[in-house]
Amino acid sequence: MRPSALALRHAVESSGKVKAVQLWDKSKDDLTKQLAELKTELGQLRIQKVVSSGSKLNKIHDLRKSIARVLTVINAKQRSQLRLFYKNKKYAPLDLRAKQTRAIRRRLSPEDKARVLEKTKKRSTHFPQRKYAIKVRFTPTRGAN
């Protein structure tokens, strides 16, 4: 066993808490091993709680949160790998796409929005928008001073 794994196991056994910072640089195999260890320890604590009726609730709580942290790191790493895999592909899975809002997702793309029908082009060239100039007369208002 590596020294970092020993130190981490000692930290887990003493406090029951796992720091998420320590998990990011671990491989997937190490994370799954640690997850299995935490789950077995949680099972043992639950049995002890029933048998001895001792208050192990704080330790159980910490273990559950540690399991959640490990699972979160595993899932985040998996999603980042999937994002790399689908980076230059035409389609990506729905859960990897940007969420945004429903209206934004259904909005026309910029190139579709810029498209103009042939008939509309002809109409705009043959009948351009007329330009009007309005002559403004300046009349000073009375009683302003």
Image: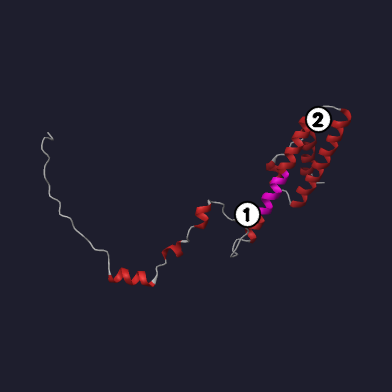
Query: Residue 65, how many percent across, how many down?
Result: 72, 38
Residue 48 magenta-highlighted: no
Please state which of residues 90 and 125 is positioned toward the viewer in this rendering.
125
Residue 67: mark in rendering: none
Please state which of residues 91 and 33 is positioned toward the viewer in this rendering.
91
**118 sits left or right of 125 in the view:** right
**70 sits left or right of 122 in the view:** right
Which dot, 1 or 2, sits closer to the camera?
A: 1
Residue wearing tag 2:
56
Q: Secondary structure at mark 1?
A: helix
Residue at 43% across, 62% down: 113
Examine the residues drawn in magenta and state their main secondary structure: helix
Residue at 75% across, 38% down: 64
- Between disc 1 and disc 2, whose residue precedes? 2
Residue 75 magenta-highlighted: yes
Give the residue type at disc 1: Asp
Quarter of the image for residue 16 reads: top right
Give the residue type at disc 2: Lys
Query: Residue 105, how many percent across, how many down?
Result: 52, 56
Quarter of the image for residue 50 reads: top right
Query: Residue 137, how many percent across, how many down?
Result: 12, 50
Residue at 27% across, 67% down: 128
Q: Residue furthest top?
A: 54
Over which residues does the magenta segment extend? 70-79
Residue at 80% across, 42% down: 39
Give the Cα separation between the discs numbered 1 and 2: 38 Å
Q: Residues within 10 Å of mark 2 (few under 14, many from 20)?
A: some
Question: From the viewer's perspective, is residue 143 above or below residue 29?
Answer: above
Residue wearing tag 1:
95
Query: Residue 56, how many percent across, how many down?
Result: 81, 30
Colouring method of the image: secondary structure
Which quarter of the rendering shows the C terminus?
A: top left
